[in-house]
Image (cartoon, rainbow, N blue to C red):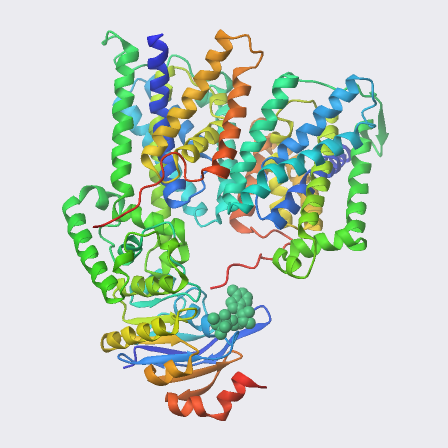
Amino acid sequence: MLAYAVDALIFINIYAILALSLNLEAGTARLMNFGKVAFFAIGAYTSALLSLAGYPFPITLAAGALLAGVAGLGVALPAVRLREDYLAIASIAFGEIIRLILLNERWLTNGPVGLRGIPQPLRDAVPDYQLFYLALTTVFMVGTATVLHLLTWSPFGRVLRAIREDELVAQALGKHTFGFKARAFALGSGIAGLAGALFAHYLSFISPDMFMPTVTFAVWTMIVVGGRGSVPGAVAGAGVVVLLERGTRVLKDYTSLGVEPSNLRMVLLGLLLILFLLYRPQGVIREGKYEVD
Amino acid sequence: MEMAQILMNILITGSLYVLMAVGVTMVYRILRFANFAHAELITLGAYVAYSLNRAGMSIYLTLPLAFAASGALGVALERGVFRPLRERGGDAIALMIASIGAGMVVRHVLQQVYSAKVLTYSTPLVSYQVLGARVSQVQVVILLLGVASIVAFHLLLTRTRMGKAMRATSDNPELARASGIPVRRVVLATWVLGGGIAGVAGVLRAADTRLVPTLGWEVLLPVFAVVLLGGIGSFYGAVAAAYLLAAAENLGVLLLGALGMSTGYRYAISFVILILVLLFRPYGIAGQRLGGERE
Amino acid sequence: MSLLVTESLGKSFGGVEALRKVSIEVERGRIVALIGPNGSGKSTLINVISGVYPPDRGRVLFEGRDITGMPPHRVAEMGVVRTFQVPRVFRGMSVVENLMVAAPGREVETVTGSLLKRRQVRGHEAECLRRAEEVMEFLEIHHMRNEYAGSLSGGQQKLLALARALMTKPKLLMLDEPVAGVAPALARKIFEKILELRSRLGFLIIEHNMDVLLDFADYVYVMHRGEIVARGAPEEVLSSRQVLEVYFGE
Ligand SMILES: Nc1ncnc2c1ncn2[C@@H]1O[C@H](COP(=O)(O)OP(=O)(O)O)[C@@H](O)[C@H]1O
Ligand SMILES: [Mg+2]
């Protein structure tokens, strides 16, 4: 029972990091990244492969985040100029291309079978590994949230919000909006890579079918429910979505409801998205407002 | 493979793309958002046909009912989700996210009801030789319906009042509304037609391949590629783009082989084309630039 | 030397020739008005000068430097700042934040700058806020500083747009119908504020109200179908037959 709760909390941490990264891009800067899962996957596979090749965890983790960030910059340079709906479609397509690469480049990724036995940092050195990993992911989650909170309410974040509200006006006030968007996208992608690396080492096994577009949609649900633009909202949204997922599994285990939990979960996520957009578009924790006395 | 067979495959794939793209392109132009739930309009028709087919109905006779079911779902989504969201000030992105949510709901309800198992229809396993290419009976129907729908749509758009209203609305929704066109009815007709034809296409694709809950989702991005390549809102552009994309996919597979790359990348062909279109020609081959915001 | 000079600017949209051989000049310390009926190309001229569209022909010179075709943010950084005909405020941000974001802040508006140069950022923020307070008091919108900009009335949004433009420390301000839809009393007040600012910068203002023009403008250009059809001191231009024809009859 405790193990189950700790496991859920670890997932909340990992998904919260992912949701925080999407919130920076989409919530603060209105960059419609629907290919989030690709950068999560790049972080996961990079860290896992380097780890399997014998590199120590701090290095593989940093490499996963860095490579995802570089990939994010590579996507951003041509793509952030696109109209928002086009960016959304293009980024979904990019995510699917990454998944096809994971499936087909067997020499590197082991194809559909995936990677097994990904080393876990300090596996034999700590008495309760799950609790250790909870502490580790909590540190990263709180760290990410703190950094992004500071950034959101800094001059940089303020320009991102201006771009979200009206990009042409931001330009007319002297802001090089392209540079701001590219940096936000790259940073968000790097953070997603960090989440991916933490995910891979926790499960110790990854395969391409863990990186379907539904992951992106779940993360979108988190920020829509939490409140787009809101840092605490992203964390809360991750909590809601992960607990919902756990809840559907419990329902299956303890009741005779003949519903497949994965179906129930996706139906509920879809309904949450629609209901929040309709009735509470600002989410459970509305984005803060900058005020002075 | 024989050249004739390749050509035939291009025509078959392209005809399915035409049927699937009509609804997306019209909704995108008139309501200004990318409707991801279109995938499930395709899938629903295929499952409705499955139930009827199991009950003994010929797969061809199920087509009108699949049309009705998917058309009705389109209307239900418009009434239950998209119109309320527009009225509450939801923008194109909110509508798009809501369409993803709606798609998730429908897809997984279907998956709950029918399971995720691969299903097949009982169809007559007849095939013909046409100019050196092998064509199954279902594929003949696909080709015929593809041509018929192109002709029918052409006539609808040019000869009927509703069609002209649709064209006027998609050219300029505000102007159409101002000049007394019943935009609301046009929008509903768009959902019925676009959704219904997608449902028919779903049955045909499932009959030609297999039936799974992701049937529509698997072709959604290629369909978006068709819509954008053709120019949003342009029916004739979409027709041309459908066959162009089909050709690119069928010939691209050969190229992959020649390059020694995995044929698993055949799905990537349309994704890459989609991205290239967005980056370099977002207004498509036929469509004009949508009037950008003034200032 | 003139602050702004345009030389024979031409711009077409499809078949519509929105600008034809438009040459104007704005000097520092002057309020130059641009008038003309709807669709005569006034907003297009501001759009071309500010880099929103490149011109098809002609040049834009600012302080003697060729800025033709520069992207909007570069033009703005040089000190040429404009407002829009429909007030475009950052609706989901507070009034004070609308102003602060407009202040030049290249060094601190980076990821690393914002996170690591904390002291420099604090200094920048304090200075920004001080100037924002000043501008808000000057334009009498200080009491609304913590409201969402989107909740302001149309006239208040026009004021906010002007305030925001002032925050950029402009050398030339181009205002596209700054008082359209503003109550007459407030409109005059806005122009009185503009007059107070005049000593330090140049203005190019699109405005229709004859009384306001007579009282505040130093020079007037009249546009019609993309061309400058008259120019001169307001008293002369506004009483000329040509201008009356342009406005009231063909
Ligand atoms: N982005 C644009 N695309 C097409 N036509 C435009 C665009 N902007 C302006 N125009 C056209 O150029 C002409 C001048 O418009 P504008 O400069 O807005 O006039 P004004 O501000 O004097 O009322 C009009 O005929 C208008 O329709
Ligand atoms: Mg104008």
At 81% from the left edge and 54% from the top edge, which residue is drawn? B159
Foreground residue among B71 and B177: B177
Q: Is residue A187 among what the camera can see?
A: yes
Relative to A234, say whether B55 is above or below: above
At 23% from the left edge and 59% from the top edge, which residue is drawn? C132
Foreground residue among A189 and B54: B54
> The N terminus of chain C appears in which quarter of the rendering?
bottom left
Residue B220 at x, y percent in the picture: 61, 35
At 85% from the left edge and 23% from the top edge, which residue is drawn? B126
Determine the image quadrant of residue B106.
top right
Relative side of B55 to C219, left or right: right
Relative to C11, say whether A226 is above or below: above
> The C terminus of chain C appears in which quarter of the rendering?
bottom right
Relative side of A292 to B41, left or right: left
Q: Is residue A189 among what the camera can see?
A: no
Foreground residue among C7 and C101: C101
Relative to C189, say whether A100 is above or below: above
- Figure label count: 0
At 25% from the left edge and 13% from the top edge, which residue is drawn? A122
Residue B85 at x, y percent in the picture: 54, 42
Relative to A14, say whether C154 is above or below: below
